Image (spheres, rainbow, N blue to C red):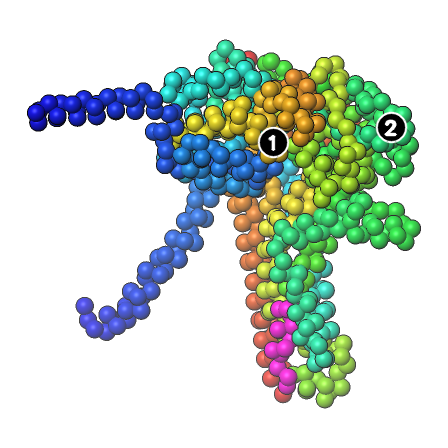
Amino acid sequence: MKTATLNRLTPYIFMAPAALIMIIALLYPLGYMIYGSFRAWDPSQTLSETEFVGLKNYISLLNDPNFHESLAVTLKFAFVVVSIEMVLGVGLALLLDRNIRGMSILRTLFILPMMIAPVVVGLMWRYMYHPTVGTFNRFLKSIGLDGVDWLGQHALMSVIIADIWQWTPFIFILSLAALQSLPSSALEASRIDGATGWQQIWHIKLPLMMPVLIVTCLLRLIDAFKVLEVILVMTEGGPGLSTEILALRISRTATEFRELGTAAAMSNYLLILLMLLTASMFAYTKFQEARAARLAAHAKEDD
Amino acid sequence: MHKLLGYLTSTAAGLAMLAGSAFAGPYDEYEGTTLVVNFPAHPHFNAVMKILPEFTKETGIEVEVDQLPYLKMRERQTLELAQDEGDYDLIAYVVFSKADYVYADQLENLAKYFMNPKLADPSYDAGDLIDGYVYNIGFAGGEKGYLQGKTGSLFGIPYGSETSILGYRKDIFEKHGLNVPETYEELLETACKIPELEPGMGGLSSRAASGHHASHAFLLHLAPLGGRVFDDQWNPIVNNEAGVEAANALKKIVECGPEGAASFGFGEALGSFLNGDTAMFLDTTVVAGQIDDPKKSKVVGKVGWALHPEGTRRGSQTGGFGIGIPANAEHKEAAFLLMQWLTSKQGDKLVAMAGGNPSRFSTHQDEDVNEKFPHMATFGEALKHADPDWRPIIPVWGKINADLGTTLSKVLTEDLDVQEALDGVAERTRTVMDEAGYYTWQ
């Protein structure tokens, strides 16, 4: 082999083992799940012992009202929590992006909730929502109001509140980092031009933060679609199926119903949904970047 | 001379070996063996941990315990039992697992061990083991496939089993001159009278949360009210008159129960009773220890115990744990010896005195046990009515149970019509059973 060719191939040869391990580690479990979704798979069997059932698991899910309900609950939960968390997290970041004494302590305090294990968060909120000994109802009763059936009639709202409490800091910390890395020249220029604080936020800060915000939003959405422990501990999906999100249904299908094939098919539906979501958000980012580039080009032409 | 000496020496050695084998203890062969057992984190098995050193002292067999939270234990066993060679020599399992494990050929049939004279202790007295528990958690292959019967075999022995019992506040009952309910009619009447007599206090504390909890609470009432989930041909009959009556009983109990009762799991239901917010508690016997523990309970010394009330028949629940030997265990015979020791009269009394749930009638009547735990005699009486068939133990039960539990939760929280709700459950159950092949012979 010629030296030049060898030189060209050397990096690939060195990278090959690591790349191979990465591919196997990434693709094998995925392939395992996809393969399993086409089989009648009981946990006591090895995958090779199972019977091939084609698309049966996927089709039966399309006709399963419980799956539809879980999907609806998941969509409602994910979009509501992420919307509120984005508004609160970005708002807090804009509010606290200044040099005030003790700000570093305040920031650390804000991010504490997301450091707590989800199971602990679930237990904590479950007992705060307790109808008789819980903090909220005791407070309501102390001011002469009736207690609220938090985990009964208002279960979905209650788990949404717990999620917002835990994950708003995630949006806050990434938004704050994005804000602090904005080019000061743009902000100074706008200040010189007489822009108000609100105009700066709306026309300078938010557009410049947008790529980070989109990725942050995407990460939170993916996470919200897969949330399990907090809801499992707080409501176990109830009452009825009112808080049974898809991850919980998948877990139940696999462990309680012992239908691993159906659980795998359900996971694949969730995977497809998340892939579509990711693709559309990246497409939106590209569109925004192209728009910004066009605007910049127009501005240059105008100059 | 040398020859004679040699002859005498070898004869003496031979005699010594013979004598040794004739007087060898049942445990000698297994001395030094280390058994790995898998137990749940559960009050009974916490008591078991206290008595295991006694077993090692007596037998020379070491025991290493992998104690896991129940759900984790189930997950771990699913993986372990599917291997060619498993890590566990003895496992604790819940009754639902019995169907799965036996069906997958993962548990040892215990006949060959009880037939082995070197292993089986003639004084074991299997007749003293609580019938309902043994049929519920130990047998498979008999009636309905999961109970005792002429075609049945023993795959496990109850250990840490539970039945249902009625706990009531003696002080509240005395204060208002209430009688302890003996029938379902009296139970429901008393449950709804208490909130009127003691404002802010619930009548009866019950689990009712969506899924397993609501289903469990419903089935607790279904058996004594004369119902079953299936008839003998596997037709769902959960929606018949007894089923509707059981669901209405649960609804009434929740309505007259403590605040927020519809979302109570087992923990909240028990917590409400321990906290003094409810006057009655109808559930598993395993709670007795906590009710008498001043660190956990505000009602120590105020609770009386009575049998699960009678409907058209007596029928208290059977549940909890059993122990069995995995088919892929490494030390099966030594594991059997441990199993036999733990469930023997001696072992059962030891674990009861350490705060565990006994599995024998004699332990419930034992003087020492009753002196330490005065409720034990009532529990023993309740066990005479333990119903091994109060809920079906079939592989597809998980799915049916979840549907039943979520539907009943809707009945309790969304005011869904009881008959309509149970008709839906019966219809969906039929589909599940059909897919699982239960109507192949119809």
Give the residue type that dot 1 points to.
Met
Q: Position of residue B423 (x, y in %)?
A: 71, 23
Give the residue type that dot 2 points to.
Glu
Q: Secondary structure at mark 1?
A: helix
Residue at the spot 85% in from the left edge and 28% down from the top edge = B173
Residue at the spot 78% in from the left edge and 25% down from the top edge = B249
Q: Is residue B435 above or below residue A8?
A: above
Of the pair A86 and A3, the residue shown nearer to us: A86
Badge 2 vs badge 1, beta-carbon distance below 8 Å: no
Q: Position of residue B307 (x, y in %)?
A: 73, 21
To which chain does the residue with label 1 belong?
A: B
Name the quadrant of the N terminus of chain B. Answer: top left
The quarter of the displayed image where residue B202 is located: top right
Q: Position of residue B36 (x, y in %)?
A: 43, 38
Q: Is residue A4 above or below residue B377?
A: below
Residue at the spot 66% in from the left edge and 53% down from the top edge = A121
Of the pair B164 and A8, the residue shown nearer to us: B164
- In reply to whether residue A118 is colored magenta, the answer given is no
Give, as a single range, the part of the protein colored magenta.
A171-185
Check residue B397 in the rendering and tell me which mark sits there, or answer none: none
Name the quadrant of the C terminus of chain B. Answer: top right
Kindly identify which residue carries mark 2: B174
Residue at the spot 89% in from the left edge and 35% down from the top edge = B198
Kindly identify which residue carries mark 1: B353
The quarter of the displayed image where residue B182 is located: top right
- Res A72 visible: no
- The reply, left or right, for residue B303 in relation to residue B111 is right
